[in-house]
Amino acid sequence: MDKDKKTDKRKKVLKGECGYINLQKKKRLLRVAMYCLIGVAIFVLGLCLNKFEKSNIFSVIAILMVLPAAKAMVGVIVLMPFQSVEREKVDQVKSLLSGADVLYTDMVFTSTEKVMFFAFLVIREDEVICLAGREKEDMAYMEKYLKAEFKRRMFSRKLYITKDEEKFLSHVGHSAPAKEVPEELTSYLTSLMV
């Protein structure tokens, strides 16, 4: 029993799975801290090796550590306003699925203009059904963005996006289950996620 719990804790949470956002925030914050510590360590090493003169190659290398730290910090800033969906809600949506249906949760997409959060994205027979993760989401923009992406990649799927959880659950429950979901579609959707 204890081994099963340890295995579950060590299991890698992939994009689109429950808990992804919360785990990524922790990992990315740790990465920022690591880059900062490495930069400080290189700077201090350079000071020690060069009789406390700041003008040395180690100082330049330490300054360059700001670049990966800044990149990692951008990821933290993008994910910070969002929380992972509760496990109970995920189980509730999973209970409505059958066949080859695909369920994604904790999805944060970025475009050149906005950051979009989908609590759930379900792929059924000929439809992609989404639940926006926040009340203030721009539904028109989200729909326009995803339709354009599907059209560009030639995915012929209807798109249904709502903010209302009851409407989402009803729509998922009344749509036809998928017999097969193209791997190109699932791969592309996961590539859009932060």
Image (spheres, rainbow, N blue to C red):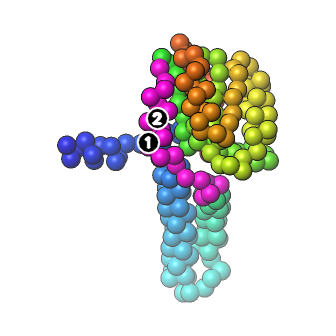
Label number found at residue 76: none
Query: What's the residue type where badge 1 is placed?
Result: Glu
Which residue is pictured at 43% across the width and 42% down the height? 88
- In which quarter of the view is residue 188 placed? top right
- Contact between marks 1 and 2 (CB within 8 A): the answer is yes
Q: Which residue is mark 2?
A: 92
Indicate yes or no whether the magenta region holds residue 82: yes
Image location of residue 77, percent across then percent down: 64, 59
Q: Which residue is mark 1?
A: 88
Camera-side residue: 41 or 53? 41
Indicate yes or no whether the magenta region holds residue 69: no
Camera-side residue: 128 or 22? 128
Image location of residue 57, percent across then percent down: 62, 72
In the picture, the quarter occupied by the N terminus is: top left
Q: What is the residue that sits farthest to the top in this orientation? A: 179
Query: What's the residue type where badge 2 is placed?
Result: Gln
- In which quarter of the view is residue 35 placed? bottom right
Q: Secondary structure at mark 2?
A: helix
Q: Using residue 138 as the reference point, say whether residue 20 is left or right of it.
A: left
79 versus 88 height, above or below: below
Find the magenta span and give its range. 78-98
Is residue 39 something that shows in the picture?
yes
3D distance between C-alphas at marks 1 and 2: 6 Å
